[in-house]
C-alpha cells in the first residue's frame, strides 16, 4: 500500500485499533520474520536510537512508524536488555506529540543523569507552509518508563544550515559532555557541528565549532554522526549522503562510513590526523550505525539493516526493517574490527561439522576456515539448483564476494546484486549469522563485514558447496534459551 502524505502524518490517535489488528495479522503471515534480530511488531523500523546503559540494563530504542511499511510520523520505541542478545520491548514510546516534535521524534541518543535517562533527539516540525523546522530537544525517562519532555529547544537551528540539521549525539569526553549534530550548510554541503555542555548541564549547550575531520566536501548531508572511543581513540561513524564515489566507491543508495582520529581536539573542534574515509560495512544494508561507550569501557554499536528510500519484499506484509546484532568494536593491528558480543554464543544449541545440507531452518551460525591459495564457493539458503545466497571466499586472489541475485524475491536490483571486498592473500575465516532473511558475515575476526537482507523462496533452505573444501562448524541457534 502506498501511503499518501496525509496518511504518513496522520495523528497516532486517528488510526483505529481494528486497522492495527489487520496489519498485525498480515505481518504475522510473513515467511521472513527473524528469530534473533529486532524487528518491528508491524510498521517500519529505522535508525537505532538512544543506545545506552540505564538502571542496570541496556536501553535501545528505534525509530518507528507503526502503521505500515512507510516513512511517516516517527516515534521512538524502547527495548531493554541485560545480555545484549535478548531485547524486550517495554511498551514505552517517545511520541511526536508536542509543538516541538509534531512531525516526528527523529533520531538521537541517550545518557543517564542521576536516576533518569536523558533522551536527546530532533523534533521534526512542519509549519502550515510545510516548511521544516528542526529542533534539538530532550526528554527524561524514569525507571518506570515514564517520559517527561523538556519543554524548550536545547539547540536552535543555526543561521548557517538549512532545515537539514538533526540527530544529536551526546558523548562523554574525559568527564565533559559534548554533542555533535549532523547538518547541511547553505552551500548544500554536509557538516557536523560540535557543542559543549556548559557545567555539564545537558540543557545548556554552547557551540564550539564545525568539526574539522578533513571532510572531502562532496556529501550534501551528514546523517547520524556519532563518536565512539575505541582504546581511547576517537572513531567517527556517520552517513555522508551523496558522497562522491571517486572519494570512496560504494554501491548502496547511501553509505555508512567512518574515520579514525589520533585524538579529538575538543577546544578546536578537530579530529586530529584522521584516516581516509572507510566503509563500515561491505554488504547491501547497513545504515545509521549507533555506537556508545559502556560504563565498563567497551565500544558497542548497532546498525539499521535497511536503507532510506527503498522498498523491501516485506512491505506487502506491512512491515520493514530490522536491527543488526550488537557488535563490539576493537582494534586489531590498527584496523577497526566489528564482532558480535560474546553473549551471542549463548544461543548455540548444537554443533555439527559444516557441509552440504538439503534442508535447514535458515537460522544458524557458521564458523568457517578457508585454506590459503584456494577459491571457495558455497551457497546458503540454497534450493536444489544451488540458487541462493552465494558466497565466494577466494584466498588466492584475495577477495570475498556476496551475491544475492538468485536468492528469493528480487529487490533493489538497480544498486547491484553483488558486493565484494579485498582480503589478504592468506588463510581466512568467516563467522556467519543467518536468520530467516538477514545475514551478517564477519570476515577475519571482523576486519570486514557484510550485512544484508534476502527474502528466500520456500524451497531455499539448503547449503550447497560449489567449490573448495570449506572447513568448519554449523551451530543451530535457539533464541528462547
Ligand atoms: C536516517 C534519518 C535521520 C532522521 C531519521 C528519521 O535514516 O533520516 O537523519 O533523524 O532517519 O526517521
Image: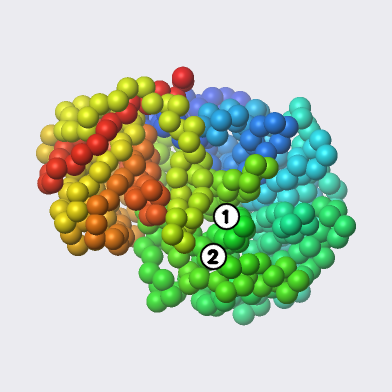
Mark 1 vs mark 2: which is more N-terminal? Answer: 1
474 in relation to 396, above or below: above
As helix, strand or loop, the secondary structure at mark 2 comes to strand
Q: Residue at x 50, y 71 (%)?
A: 275
Q: Position of residue 171 (x, y in %)?
A: 70, 54
Picture quadrant of ligand 1: bottom right
Asked whether residue 372 appears in the rendered view, the answer is yes
Q: Looking at the rendered structure, which numbered label has been put on residue 260?
A: 2
Instruction: Work out how far the residue at label 1 is from the one at label 2, CA to CA, in angstroms.
Output: 9 Å
Instruction: Give the crowd class for mark 2: few <14, some 14-19, many >=20 residues within 10 Å.
Output: many
Quarter-wise, where is residue 225 in the image? bottom right
Whether ligand 1 has any atom under 8 Å from the Cβ at mark 1 is answered as no
Q: Looking at the rendered structure, which numbered label has been put on residue 426?
A: none
Per the image, the residue denoted by label 1 is: 230
Contact between marks 1 and 2 (CB within 8 A): the answer is yes
Residue extending farthest right: 199
Q: Position of residue 110 (x, y in %)?
A: 70, 46
Horizontally, is 60 left or right of 241 in the view? right
Residue extending farthest top: 481
Quarter-wise, where is residue 142 in the image? top right
417 in relation to 46, above or below: below
Amino acid at each position: 500500500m502506498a501511503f499518501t502524505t496525509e496518511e504518513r502524518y496522520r495523528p497516532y490517535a486517528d488510526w483505529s485499533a481494528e486497522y492495527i489488528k489487520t496489519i498485525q495479522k498480515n505481518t504475522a503471515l510473513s515467511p521472513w520474520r527473524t528469530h534473533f534480530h529486532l524487528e518491528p511488531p508491524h510498521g517500519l523500523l529505522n535508525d537505532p536510537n538512544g543506545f545506552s546503559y540505564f538502571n542496570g540494563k541496556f536501553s535501545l530504542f528505534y525509530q518507528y512508524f507503526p502503521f505500515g511499511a512507510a516513512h511517516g510520523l516517527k516515534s521512538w520505541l524502547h527495548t531493554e536488555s541485560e545480555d545484549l542478545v535478548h531485547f524486550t520491548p517495554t511498551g514505552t514510546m517517545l511520541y511526536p506529540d508536542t509543538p516541538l516534535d509534531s512531525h516526528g521524534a527523529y533520531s538521537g541518543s541517550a545518557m543517564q543523569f542521576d536516576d533518569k535517562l536523558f533522551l536527546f533527539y530532533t523534533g521534526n516540525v512542519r509549519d502550515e507552509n510545510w516548511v521544516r523546522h528542526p529542533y534539538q530537544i530532550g526528554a527524561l525517562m524514569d525507571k518506570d518508563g515514564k517520559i517527561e519532555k523538556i519543554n524548550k529547544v536545547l539547540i536552535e537551528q543555526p543561521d548557517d544550515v538549512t532545515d537539514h540539521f538533526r540527530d544529536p549525539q551526546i558523548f562523554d569526553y574525559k568527564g565533559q559532555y559534548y554533542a555533535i549534530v549532523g547538518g547541511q550548510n547553505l552551500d548544500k554541503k554536509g557538516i557536523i557541528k560540535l557543542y559543549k555542555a556548559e557545567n555539564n548541564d545537558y540543557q545548556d549547550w554552547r557551540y564550539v565549532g564545525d568539526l574539522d575531520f578533513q571532510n572531502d566536501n562532496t556529501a550534501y548531508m551528514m546523517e547520524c554522526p556519532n563518536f565512539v572511543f575505541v582504546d581511547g581513540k576517537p572513531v567517527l561513524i556517520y552517513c555522508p549522503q551523496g558522497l562522491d564515489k571517486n572519494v570512496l566507491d560504494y554501491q548502496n543508495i547511501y553509505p555508512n562510513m567512518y574515520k579514525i582520529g589520533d585524538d579529538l581536539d575538543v577546544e578546536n573542534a578537530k579530529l586530529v590526523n584522521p584516516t581516509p574515509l572507510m566503509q563500515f560495512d561491505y554488504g547491501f544494508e547497513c545504515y545509521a550505525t549507533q555506537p556508545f561507550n559502556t560504563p565498563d569501557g567497551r565500544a558497542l554499536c548497532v546498525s539499521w539493516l535497511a536503507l532510506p528510500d527503498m522498498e523491501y519484499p516485506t512491505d506487502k506484509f506491512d512491515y520493514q526493517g530490522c536491527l543488526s546484532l550488537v557488535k563490539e568494536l576493537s582494534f586489531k593491528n590498527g584496523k577497526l574490527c566489528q564482532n558480535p558480543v560474546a553473549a551471542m554464543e549463548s544461543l548455540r544449541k548444537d554443533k555439527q561439522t559444516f557441509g552440504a545440507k538439503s534442508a535447514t531452518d535458515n537460522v544458524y551460525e557458521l564458523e568457517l576456515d578457508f585454506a590459503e591459495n584456494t577459491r571457495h564457493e558455497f551457497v546458503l539458503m540454497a534450493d536444489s539448483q544451488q540458487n541462493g545466497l552465494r558466497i565466494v571466499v577466494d584466498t588466492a586472489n584475495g577477495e570475498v564476494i556476496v551475491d544475492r541475485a538468485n536468492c528469493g524475491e528480487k529487490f533493489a536490483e538497480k544498486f547491484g546484486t553483488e558486493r565484494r571486498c579485498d582480503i589478504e592473500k592468506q588463510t581466512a575465516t568467516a563467522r556467519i549469522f543467518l536468520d530467516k532473511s538477514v545475514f551478517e558475515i564477519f570476515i577475519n575476526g571482523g576486519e570486514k563485514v557484510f550485512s544484508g537482507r534476502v527474502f528466500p523462496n520456500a524451497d531455499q533452505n539448503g547449503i550447497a558447496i560449489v567449490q573448495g573444501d570449506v572447513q568448519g562448524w554449523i551451530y543451530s541457534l535457539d533464541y528462547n534459551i
